[in-house]
Image (tube, rainbow, N blue to C red):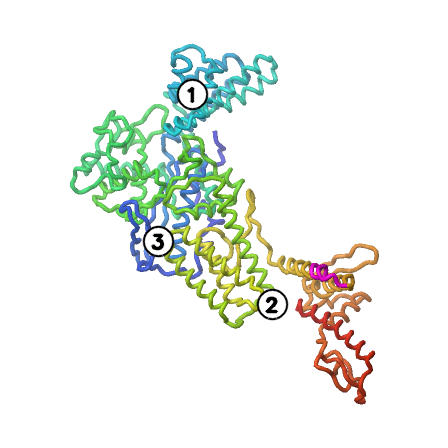
Amino acid sequence: MFPLSLSRLLRSPGYLYRSRFSRALTTPSNPPQQNTEHGPRIFNSLTKSKTPLPDTSGEPLKWYSCGPTVYDSSHLGHARNYVAQDVIRRVLADYFGYNIHYVMNVTDIDDKIIGRTREQYFLEKFSSTHTRLSSDLLSEIEILLKQFLSSRIPDLLHRNSGGPQAGPLCWSALLEALQETGRSEAALRANESLKGNVSFATRCLEALVTAQSILELGEPAAARDGVAQLILQSKEVLGPMLNAKFHDESIDPDLFGRTADFWEAQFFHDMARLNVLPPDTVTRASEYVLEIVDFITGIIHKGYGYVSNGSVYFDTAKFSASGVHQYNKLVAGAIGTQQNSQGDKKSAADFALWKAAKPGEPSWASPWGPGRPGWHIECSAMASSIFGANIHIHSGGVDLMFPHHTNELAQSEAFHNCSDWVDCFIHVGHLHIDGYKMSKSLKNFITIEDLLKRYTARQIRLAFLLRPWDSNLDYSDVIMTQEVLPLEASLNNFFSLVSSSSRNDATFKHGCTFGASERHLKEKFDNTKVTFHKALCDSINTPASIAAIRSLVSQTNTYLNQSSGSIDSFLVLGISRWIMRMLRIFGLDALDATRVGWSIQPSGSDEITVKPELPPYLQALSSFRDDIRKIARDKSPSMGRDILTLCDRMRDTVLPPMGVQLADQPGRPTVIKFVERSRGRGPNLTQLPTRESTQSSKRLERSKINPSDMFKPPHVTGQYGSWDEQGVPLTDADGMDLSKNQRKKLQKQWKFQQALHEQFENFH
C-alpha cells in the first residue's frame, strides 16, 4: 500500500506549506480598503448574470470551495480549477481589499477511494502469490480480461468471441478489434469512457502475448522477471476485476484512511508547486461524521428526508412541491435526469444522504444503522458548521453544478429553511484535451507532476489567465508555444530593458524634462490602470487585464528605445513596479515587491534568483564588449592601442570598486584577486604599491582632468599666457606666439587627454 510515514500527515497543525506560502507573499503591507460601489461583479451561476459581491463591511467574506476527492494523482484539470480560484481569491483580497475566510473540503470518504484502496490491496495480494510466469497465471489473467471486456466493452466481446460464456479468447483477433475500436472517433465520442477501457484492455492483451512468448522460450530468469511486468501492464484490468471477485471480503479499515492521506498530501504538494495559496481552513468528511449525522437528522425532522433499508434519501418531489423551495436553481430541468436506478428510493431523482453499510466498506454508527455519508451531504454539513445558514461564495468546477451543487443547495436550504443559502456560485469551466473532456475515468489526464517537467508554474498560470475562468479551455501545446511562451518572453525582455536602462546614469534621469514623450507615456499609464480596473471589475476578466499590460509594455519599450534624449526614471520605474505588482496579484511571482522584474523559473527545477551583486559585473562586461565592438567597426589605425587602453581601464578603474584586482604577469595568465572594495571610484589604493599599481594610479588621476584645463594652473604653471576655446595654449608666459610644431604637439596631447577623460566619465 502507501508509505506509513504519510499516514495522518495532514492532521498536524501548521501543515499546508505555511512556511513557504503565507499571505505575506501576496498581501500588501497596506492592503486596499474594500470598495463594493466600484468593486467586482462576478458571473453567478445562480442568476446566470454578473452580480456584485455583498458588502461585508470588513467582516470576512465567507467562501467555501469544493476540494478534491483524494484517490489519485492531481492532473491538469485540477490545476485549471484551483489556479483559477486562486487568481479570483488573490484579486478579491489583494486588489479589492476583501477579508476572505477561504474554506476547502477534502472528500476522504467516497466510492472511488474505497474502490482504489481495495483494488490496490487485492492487486498486491495477487502479485505476492505469483512469483513467476506460468500457464495457470496467463489463464487466470485471460479470464479476468474477459470479465473486464464483458462489463466495460460488451459489444466488442460479443462480436469477436461469441459472448462472455464462450471459450478462450482469440488474442490476435481481439487485439485487432481493440485497435480498430480505438481508431473510431465516432465510437470514442459517443462513449467517453471507451477510450480508457480500450487502452487498458489493449495493454493487458499485449502483455499476455509477450508473456506467452517468454514462456515458450523456456528461460527461467525471463519467467521470473516477466511476471512483474505482466501484472504491471494489466493492473487497470486486474484491480477492478479482483475487487469484484472478492467484493464480500473485508480489509483493514485503516487502509482507506492511508489512501486518502497519501493522495491529499500529494494534492497540496502539487498546489504549492503551482503557487496556489493554501486554504485558511481545511475540512475532511471523516472528521465531521457526527455533524453530518446531525444535519441529516435535521432534514428528516423538517420532512424532506426518509429512511429506506438503512439508507436515508432526500425527497426531491416533496422539496419541489413545498411552495417555498426550488430544486433546480442551477440547471433548469435537472430534476429526474440523474442516472440512478430507483431501488429503495421513492423517485429516481432522490439522492442518498446516508448510505447503508456494505460488506468490505468502512462504516460509522448512526440512528439508521451502520453506514457512511452520501457525497453531497458532507459539504452542506461542513460548510454550515463553519459559516452557518449563509455562504457568500461557493465554488468548484462546472462539472459539479449537477448533481453535486444542485443537491447540496437543496438539502442545505431544506435544513436551514431558507431560499438563499449561497449568494454567489462560481463554476470554473471545463478543461479539454484534444477535444475530450478531462476525466480520470478516461485516463487521458496529464498529471501536474508531468506538466511541471515541461512548463513552469508561471507558464501554466499564464495559460489559464489568457482564457476567461468560466469558459471551457481546450489545452494543447500550441497554446503554450504560440501564446504563453512569447508573452513570458515579452515580459522578461521588458523587465531586463528597464533594469539595464536604470544602470545608465547618463540617460536614466531623476526628474528630467517632462516633454511630449513623457506626457504621452503617462497618459497611457493612467489609461491602462483604468482599463485594468474595469477588466477586473468585469468578473475578473484576466484576458483583458493581461492585454492592457501588454499594450503598456509595448509603449514603454518604444519610449525606452528612443534614439536620443533622457529617460524619466520615476515614470518608467513607476510603470514597471505597477506592472509587477499586478502580476504578483495574479500569483505570477512570489518575491519581494520592491524589486523590478520577476524570478527566473526554468522548467522542471526551482526558480533561479539573481543575486543583487551580480548585475554590476554583467554591466561592466557588457560595456566592455560594446566598446570593443565599436573599435572593431571603426577600424581605426590605433585599434590595437585602443583595445589595450580598454583592458587597462577595466583593470584599473572598473573592477577595483567591485572588490576585484587583476595582476598582469608577463607571458602568463593574469592573476585574479578578491580584495576589499575601494571607497569611491577608482583602484583599490589600500594595496601595497607596486610599479604596475603606481602607474595605474597615476593614469587614473590623470584621466580625471578635463582636457580644457590640462594646460592651465594648477596642472601647468608659468608656461603659457593664453589659450583657445578648447584650452590649447596660444602663447607662452611672455606672450609670444607658440610655433606651429609646438601647437601641433599640444593639440595631440589634448586629443589623447580627451579620450582618456571620456573613458573616465563613462564609468564614473
Q: Where 351 falls versus 754 (above or below)?
A: above
Distance from Cα at disc 1 to Cα at disc 2 = 74 Å
Kind of element beneath mark 2 = loop
Kind of element beneath mark 1 = helix
Q: Rate crowding at label 1 as few (under 14), some (14 to 19) or many (20 or more) other CA atoms within 10 Å.
A: many
Q: Which residue is mark 1?
A: 242
Q: Which residue is mark 2?
A: 505
Q: What main secondary structure does the magenta stretch of the protein show?
A: helix
Rendered location of residue 518, percent (x, y): 49, 68
Quadrant of the drawing holding the C terminus? bottom right
Q: Rate crowding at label 3 as few (under 14), some (14 to 19) or many (20 or more) other CA atoms within 10 Å.
A: some
Q: Which mark is residue 371?
A: none
Camera-nearest residue between 442 and 265: 442
Taking the spot 41% from the left edge, 60% from the top edge, the residue there is: 31
Q: Which mark is residue 538?
A: 3
Distance from Cα at disc 3 to Cα at disc 1 = 52 Å
Please state the extent of the stretch shown in magenta in the rendering. Answer: 628-636
Spot the residue most to the bottom. 734
Camera-nearest residue between 65 and 189: 189
